[in-house]
Image: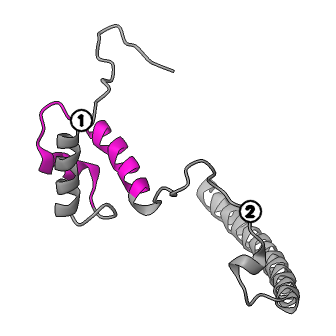
Amino acid sequence: MGSSSSDGASKERLKWTQELHSLFDKAVNQLGGPDRATPKGILKVMGIPGLTIFHVKSHLQKYRMSKFIPESPNRGSRFERRSISEILPNFSATSGAQLHEALQMQKEVQKRLTDQLEVRLGQWLEVGGNRASGIGLYYNR
């Protein structure tokens, strides 16, 4: 959805030319790479009139995605269904059973911890409630 304003101050779309992207790339590298560079820092280093923090934020997001999630060579199908034995050749049925058992144990431990936490929270609220009512009585005197 596009937005318009009566004073004509709507957001301008910026075309990232190769030259502008090259300056952006140099600024990002100068600031320590895509994971350390901030939009504000990039904007300062680039020093391009008319370039806004919003332009840089958006471009940095796309830049980071392209750096950290490289595009697959086969763009037609993004996902390929493969069997577990193709991915992990040493995976056996016994390994699967062991993983299942470990997961069940982990779920059981998680449930016990959650139950303990609920009990402790209830106790804490009771004590806190009693203290709060005691404080309230003290201030009402």
Q: Residue 76 appears at what percent x and percent y?
A: 60, 47
In the image, residue 90 lies in the stretch drawn in magenta = no
At a point 29% along the width and 11% down the height, the residue shown is 8
Could you tell whether 34 is left or right of 45 in the image? Answer: right
Amino acid type at circle 2 is Arg
> Mark 1 or 2 closer to N-term?
1
At a point 81% along the width and 80% down the height, the residue shown is 116
Q: Residue 21 appears at what percent x and percent y?
A: 23, 45
Q: Nearer the viewer, residue 87 or 56?
A: 87
Callouts 1 and 2 close, C-beta under 8 Å: no
Q: Residue 92 appears at what percent x and percent y?
A: 82, 89
Could you tell whether 36 is left or right of 51 in the image? Answer: right
**Callout 1: 10 Å neighbours few (<14), some, many (20+)?**
some
Q: Main secondary structure of the magenta part?
A: helix
Could you tell whether 129 is left or right of 135 in the image? Answer: right
Q: Nearer the viewer, residue 86 or 125?
A: 86
Please tell me in which quadrant of the rendered image residue 98 appears.
Answer: bottom right
At a point 66% along the width and 57% down the height, the residue shown is 79
Magenta-tinted stretch: 37-66
**Which mark is nearer the camera, 1 or 2?**
2
Return the residue at label 1: 52
Please tell me in which quadrant of the rendered image residue 35 appears.
Answer: bottom left
Return the residue at label 2: 81
In the displayed structure, would residue 16 be above or below residue 94? above
For the C terminus, give its image quadrant: bottom right
Q: Which mark is residue 137?
A: none
Count up the numbered dots: 2
Residue that extends furthest to the top in the rendered view of this protein: 6
Model colouring: one colour
